[in-house]
Image (spheres, rainbow, N blue to C red):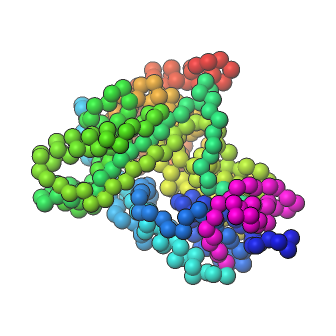
Amino acid sequence: MPPDDAYACDYLIIGGGAAGLSLAYHLAQEPRLADKRVVVVEPESVKANDRTWRYWATGSTPFEAVEAHRWAKLVLRTPTYEHVFGLGPYRYRMVRAQDFYTHVHQVLAARPAQFTCLSGRVVALTEVPGGVCARLADGQSLRVRYAFDSRLPALVREPTRYRYLEQHFRGWEVETDHDAFDPDTVQFMDFRVPQRGQARFVYTLPFSKRRALVEFTVFSPQRLPVEEYETELRRYLAAQLAGQPYRIVAEEGGSIPMTDHPLPARASAHVLNLGTRAGRAKPSTGYTFARIQRHSARLVQALATTGYPPVDATGDRWQFRLFDTLLLDVIQRHGDQLGGIFADLFHRNAVPRLFAFLDEQTSWRENYYIMRSVTPWPFLQALGRVLWSRTGKRP
């Protein structure tokens, strides 16, 4: 190692958010990698409790110890359809950001010989023989064997070939003085709000009969002014609570990219991408947390077994990328049809099959039956546009 290296390590993790800390956690759980030195570089040492992550799973999960709640049922509502579904072996789960950050940092702090956390910003990654050199904004450099980069990608958009939407939202955690919620049932989507030519719905996570996170969500190319989200939340809560008072005890908001623009999982021989940068935000739904865990587990398993990251870093299957693209195309052009599409999917398929499909774990046969359960014409039109654009034509 060059003598001016401030740190030398086996693995550099750039970013201490969900993706970076998930990989660090999985590395800490693998005894075969206990002798590997890991540096985590993050721009902020204190993380705000400004978001939650939601996912579904069967059995045990890596972060079940810090789950804020889990639900055994979900309800889907549209202007013409409403049904409560049991989740079978699945449970819908939620983890708060602060609980996740605290838990992982405690795990890493218990292994000081293996993990070092630095406050800083990586400004350049350069391939060198046998590894990569990372340059930090303060002038430090680290020469490492592999770097794992979770910084948000900077895309050069190609709107004639790919689709670009955002899932943007604002949520209020509210308390009431009367029983208003069912703590066993998550409201997956309520489309009974004005669609305004877009996909708009309210998502409700009840923690008790008197406390819930209520979130107004939109799939569209641009975010809304904060006042518009809050106006919709006030209207919705006034209707659902029949005018009864409530208190806002916490707030969250944000945006998740939804795009079929290629996001490679490997940047170079010794630099691998994580999280959104690696395409772990599912293009058609925005769900990210569980995909990050599967990606982290796959990377760590390969490193422990072979000493190298897997050649296929994600294991993604092409047909699911196509399904995501088709649904994105439909949402981009006819977002107000999304409620009907989800109503068809849930009405004609068991929830465990749908969850497995969204996790990209279903077979060709199951995929066929799922695709048959929706009105085909919008998706056939989308397929034609996709094929046309791939020949270099404008869709």
Residue occupying the point 62% across, 55% down: 150
Indicate whether residue 80 is drawn in magenta.
no
Query: Residue 252's spot in the image, x, y percent?
Result: 37, 54
Q: Position of residue 165 (x, y in %)?
A: 49, 35
The residue segment tinted magenta is 114-143
Residue shown at 53% from the left, 47% from the top: 281
Quick check: is 139 in the magenta stretch?
yes
Classify residue 242 as left or right of residue 109: left
- Between 188 and 244, the one lying in front of the other is 244
Q: Residue 322 sits in which quadrant?
A: top right
Q: Please tell me whether residue 213 is drawn above or below residue 144 in the rendered image.
A: above
Q: Nearer the viewer, residue 301 or 395?
A: 395
Residue 47 image offset from top left, x and y in percent:
48, 65
* Image quadrant where residue 383 sits: top right
In this orientation, does residue 344 appear? Answer: no
Residue closest to the far front: 138
Residue 310 in the image: above or below residue 243? below
Where is the N terminus found, in terms of image quarters?
A: bottom right
Q: Residue at x 50, y 68 (%)?
A: 46
Residue depicted at 32% across the width and 30% down the height: 195
Instruction: Name the image quarter holding residue 136.
Output: bottom right
- Is residue 287 rendered to the left or right of residue 145? left
Left or right: 76 as drawn, with respect to 320: left
Q: How many marks?
A: 0
> What is the magenta segment's predominant secondary structure?
strand
Residue 217 rendering spot, x and y as whole percentages: 36, 42
Work out which quarter of the rendered image holds the C terminus and state it: top right
Is residue 29 visible to us here? Answer: yes
